[in-house]
Amino acid sequence: MINRFDYDGDYGTVLNRFLVQSAVGHRLTVYGAGGQIRALIHIQDSVRCVELAMDHPPKAGDRVHIYNQMTETHRLIDLTNKVVELTGGEISYIENRRQEAESNELKVSNECFLNIELDPIALKDNLMVEVAEVSRRYKDRAEFTKIPTQSRCIEDKEKTLIC
């Protein structure tokens, strides 16, 4: 039994997108220069975070605690290069149609979860290889029309791009 994951060429989970693209022989699509930083979390850690939050409810009168469900951050181009190194894929840089900077410095912390016993699963080569191998094994089920980016942006009256 394996997990199902849905793939979306525009807004899907970036690491799965890169691994699926590589596995089925599609070039890895990087928006702009790939300087954007994304937060990642393993699905098991995501479930564990919900469990930990339920096991540690706030006490009456407590200040608000921010629990960021993430375990690590990576710049997109670094993730892409890692996938290329592991799978032999190739990169295709495409116009960034999203309303976002070409690069950012995402400052996010999971300290609240770490303080209540989250033991994160770090991104490791073997985890990525496993997803790539499953994708290769079942690539005959892939909907290749979903792999390329489909979104199109339009300009409104104020010349703002809407995607």
Image: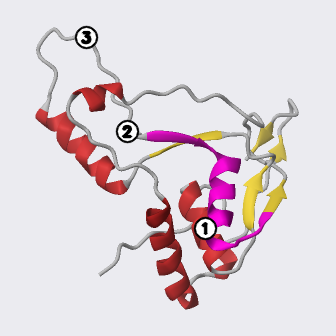
The span shown in magenta is 72-91
- Determine whether the residue tagged by mark 1 lies in a helix, strand or loop: helix
Q: Quadrant of residue 149?
A: bottom right
* Amino acid type of the residue tagged 1 in the rendering: Leu
Q: Residues within 10 Å of mark 1 (few under 14, many from 20)?
A: some
How far across and how far down the image is residue 136, in percent? 55, 83
First in sequence: mark 1 vs mark 3:
3
- Return the residue nearer the eye: 161 or 86: 86
Per the image, the residue denoted by label 1 is: 86
Q: What residue is rendered at 44% in x and 64% in y?
A: 127
Q: Quadrant of residue 82?
A: bottom right
- Return the residue nearer the eye: 132 or 66: 132
Measured in 3D between alpha carbons, the distance from the residue under mark 3 to the one under mark 2, in whole angstroms, is 19 Å
Q: Nearer the viewer, mark 1 or mark 3?
A: 1
User: Could you tell me which quadrant the N terminus lies in?
Assistant: bottom left
In the image, residue 81 lies in the stretch drawn in magenta: yes
Do the CB atoms of the residues marked 2 and 1 lie less than 8 Å apart? no
**90 left or right of 144 in image:** right
Q: Residues within 10 Å of mark 3 (few under 14, many from 20)?
A: few
Q: Is residue 125 visible?
A: yes
How far across and how far down the image is residue 96, in percent? 79, 48
Q: What residue is rendered at 50% in x and 64% in y?
A: 128
Measured in 3D between alpha carbons, the distance from the residue under mark 1 to the one under mark 3, in whole angstroms, is 45 Å
